Image (cartoon, helix red, strand yellow):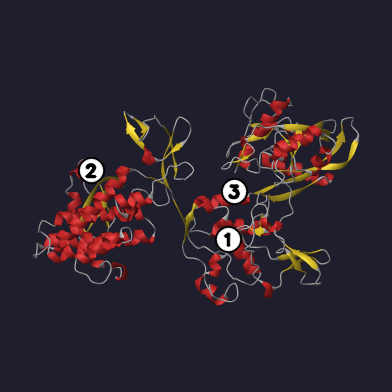
């Protein structure tokens, strides 16, 4: 990331340069990558939405302005813009182009101020977030765009630091009344602000814009104002009218645009896959022959000069052209590492095959049934993998376009941050609570407590896993991290939470120890009750684990532990207690494998838990004997009753007619009939 022109981690000055680089044409699949997201039903909606926004499909208008100099003399070129809000053309008060636009590059050759402005914009970097946060600045180019409909009106043309060359045409028209960014810019440079869209029924003469642009919300009823032939139209109608007129004038066309850019895969560094092409002055770009693959990196590289070490290597890049046998040079850029991570799933199907992918193996294993990874992969790795699967299908290496059937994005472990007065980050281990605040354990200095953030080495809000394991054991750490929070959400690491998890591990150990010593026949009702509870817990945990609902599975383990603890008073049989204890151990094993193995041995087993088949719940024991039905009087709910599951309808009638709530609702009226819907409802008509 680039912040204020410097690398966020190193603080080094960052310079934006134009380089000849390699790209993969992911944009050829923009529409397909977008539309296919609707079929990924087992992906989180938030990830699908992130990819939709990243691909960024929009329907708009590509049109051009005639240009002229300050004296009104026509220029021999037009300014092409792309917009999704061509309906607001009558509110335009300026045009703005990217600092990387060809027009700006050409004009900057003879304008030092413009050249300096370009360098200032380059220092912002390419992060859209940084560009959006930066103060909106512009530089007048000294030329003007003629309004396509108000031909006596012309718009000043600026280069602006918020216009991106990578989107649309790298040029916009600014409508300050209806875009906050344009409004900020217009206020800064004293440009007109004319509202052209307003709520229906608004008086156009009195409708003005203050510090905030007027932005329609979904469902708003708005019309065009101050827009000549568009006045009174709704936005969709106005868009269609402007598009039609521009097309007839020969200055524009309707266009679908995508925010997605082609994937730049060149990296000017040593580590990475060499790009397998050779540059020959006679033959041009020549692929490395298949029998010379893979291209291997030199091992005698040095890092004593700035720039790409491969470019400086004395011999590695100098080769013979495979085509004409003349002198040539290797490509010294290496691939982005996302190249490797975008098709590993296909290679893993046949890791030892001579060819990149064995089709039969890929057909057998693909798609990946379950992908688990962080949300940070949503718009890079996961999108690139989807593109790569399509590209490999096009080249005959695969015949499946979606590599991951189900996606689960896990949360992160987070922790408070601590800072000294000097601004230095402090480890949680060095922070102690004192007098309602936090101080440094070694110096006693008062510490500033920051927000709760994901653990990171740079902010030192990390807890050393070795310390956790030494103090509590690995099982406690696993149990706590999975216990209180759904795994797709972040979890705050707290000592109190870890202590609670540690106490439960001790309780499991005690319960299993007592269960192993249990004897006696017990009472039939208590025995049946314990067995039902154990089998219901097993059935629920099996379902929860399959759906990655670990916190719910753990909650059921807690419940069974409580039930087992209560049953150890001798009322349940020893066999039922042992069965419940075995289920408890097996259900805990995925989260606490070490404790489970030791507890399993305590129960007398010689085969390890990891080699023991997962038990199956008895359907007869998980079926409920009783059900709860609603009681209605003349269609209105008045009560509910719990009854045996197989209770005859006539007995249900007698039971509900005896209820005080039914008598009050009838108010002395005679009962005409009773309708019993088995397992659901009893309705008294009176």
| In the rendered image, the vertical position of residue 285 relative to residue 139, given as above or below | below
x and y, in percent, of residue 450 in the image: 44, 35
- Is 329 left, or right, of 424 in this rendering? right
**SS at circle 1:** helix
Between residue 109 and residue 384, name the one nearer to us: 109
| Mark drawn on residue 385 | 1
State which quadrant residue 473 falls in.
bottom left
Residue 51 visible in the snapshot: yes
Q: Earlier in the sequence, mark 2 or mark 3?
A: 3
Q: Which residue is mark 3?
A: 53
> Residue at left 71%, top 57%?
311
C-alpha gap between disc 1 and disc 3: 17 Å
**Viewer can see residue 683:** no
Spot occupied by residue 220 in the image (x, y as percentages of width and height): 59, 36
Q: Nearer the viewer, residue 71 or 109?
A: 109
Residue 440 in the image: x percent, y percent? Answer: 38, 34
Q: Residue at image x 55%, y 57%?
A: 38
Which x, y percent locates residue 252?
79, 46
- 1 or 2: tag closer to the N-terminus: 1
- What residue is drawn where x is 55% and y is 49%? 50
Q: Is residue 207 left or right of residue 557?
A: right
């Amino acid at each position: 990331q680039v912040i204020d022109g410097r690398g966020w981690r190193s603080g080094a000055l960052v310079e934006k340069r134009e380089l000849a680089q390699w790209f993969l044409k992911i944009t050829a699949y923009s529409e397909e990558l977008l539309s296919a997201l609707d079929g990924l039903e087992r992906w989180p909606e938030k990830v699908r939405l992130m990819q939709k926004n990243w691909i960024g499909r929009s329907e708009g208008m590509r049109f051009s302005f005639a240009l002229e100099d300050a004296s009104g003399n026509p220029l021999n070129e037009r300014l092409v813009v792309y917009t999704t809000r061509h309906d607001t053309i009558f509110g335009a008060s300026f045009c703005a182009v990217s600092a990387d636009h060809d027009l700006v590059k050409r004009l900057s050759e003879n304008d030092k101020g413009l050249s300096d402005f370009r360098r200032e914009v380059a220092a912002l970097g390419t992060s859209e977030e940084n560009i959006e946060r930066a103060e909106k600045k512009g530089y007048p180019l000294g030329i003007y765009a003629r309004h396509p409909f108000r031909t006596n009106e012309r718009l000043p043309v600026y280069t602006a630091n918020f216009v991106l060359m990578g989107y649309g045409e790298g040029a916009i028209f600014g409508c300050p009344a209806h875009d906050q960014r344009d409004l900020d810019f217009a206020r800064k440079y004293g440009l007109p602000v004319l509202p052209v869209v307003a709520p229906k029924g608004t008086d156009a003469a009195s409708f003005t814009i203050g510090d905030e642009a007027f932005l329609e919300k979904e469902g708003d009823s708005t019309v065009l104002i101050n827009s000549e032939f568009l006045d009174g139209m709704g936005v969709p109608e106005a868009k269609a009218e402007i598009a039609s007129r521009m097309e007839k004038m020969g200055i524009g066309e309707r266009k679908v645009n995508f925010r997605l850019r082609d994937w730049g895969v060149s990296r000017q560094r040593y580590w990475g896959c060499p790009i397998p092409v050779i540059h020959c002055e006679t033959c041009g770009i020549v692929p490395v022959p298949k029998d010379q693959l893979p291209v291997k990196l030199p091992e005698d590289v040095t890092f004593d000069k700035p720039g790409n070490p491969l470019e400086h290597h004395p011999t590695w890049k100098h080769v013979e052209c495979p085509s004409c046998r003349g002198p040539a040079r290797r490509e010294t850029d290496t691939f982005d590492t996302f190249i490797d991570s975008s098709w590993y799933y296909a290679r893993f199907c046949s890791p030892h095959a001579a060819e990149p992918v064995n089709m039969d193996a890929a057909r057998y294993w693909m798609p990946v049934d379950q992908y688990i990874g962080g949300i940070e992969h949503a718009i890079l790795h996961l999108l690139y993998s989807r593109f790569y699967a399509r590209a490999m299908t096009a080249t005959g290496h695969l015949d499946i376009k979606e590599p991951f059937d189900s996606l689960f994005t896990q949360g992160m472990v987070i922790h408070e941050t601590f800072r000294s007065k000097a601004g230095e980050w402090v480890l949680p281990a060095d922070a102690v609570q004192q007098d309602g605040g936090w101080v440094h354990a070694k110096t006693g200095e008062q510490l500033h407590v920051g927000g709760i953030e994901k653990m990171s080495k740079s902010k030192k809000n990390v807890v050393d896993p070795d310390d956790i394991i030494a103090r509590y054991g690995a099982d406690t750490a696993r149990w706590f991290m999975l216990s209180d929070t759904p795994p797709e959400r972040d979890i705050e690491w707290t000592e109190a939470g870890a202590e609670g998890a540690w106490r439960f591990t001790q309780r499991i150990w005690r319960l299993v120890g007592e269960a192993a010593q249990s004897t006696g026949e017990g009472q039939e009702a208590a025995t049946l009750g314990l067995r039902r509870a154990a089998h219901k817990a097993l059935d629920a945990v099996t379902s929860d684990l399959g759906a990655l609902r670990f916190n719910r599975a753990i909650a059921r383990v807690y419940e069974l532990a409580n039930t087992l603890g209560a049953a150890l008073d001798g009322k349940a049989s020893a066999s039922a207690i042992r069965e419940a204890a075995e289920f408890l151990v097996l259900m805990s094993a995925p989260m606490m494998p070490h404790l489970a193995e030791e507890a399993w041995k305590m129960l007398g087993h010689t085969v390890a838990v990891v080699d023991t088949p997962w038990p199956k719940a008895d359907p007869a024991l998980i079926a409920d004997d009783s059900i709860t039905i609603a009681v209605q009087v003349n269609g209105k709910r008045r009560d509910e009753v719990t009854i045996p599951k197989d209770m005859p309808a006539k007995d249900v009638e007698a039971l509900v007619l005896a209820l005080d709530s039914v008598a009050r609702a009838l108010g002395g009226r005679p009962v005409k009939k009773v309708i019993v819907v088995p397992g659901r409802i009893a309705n008294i008509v009176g």
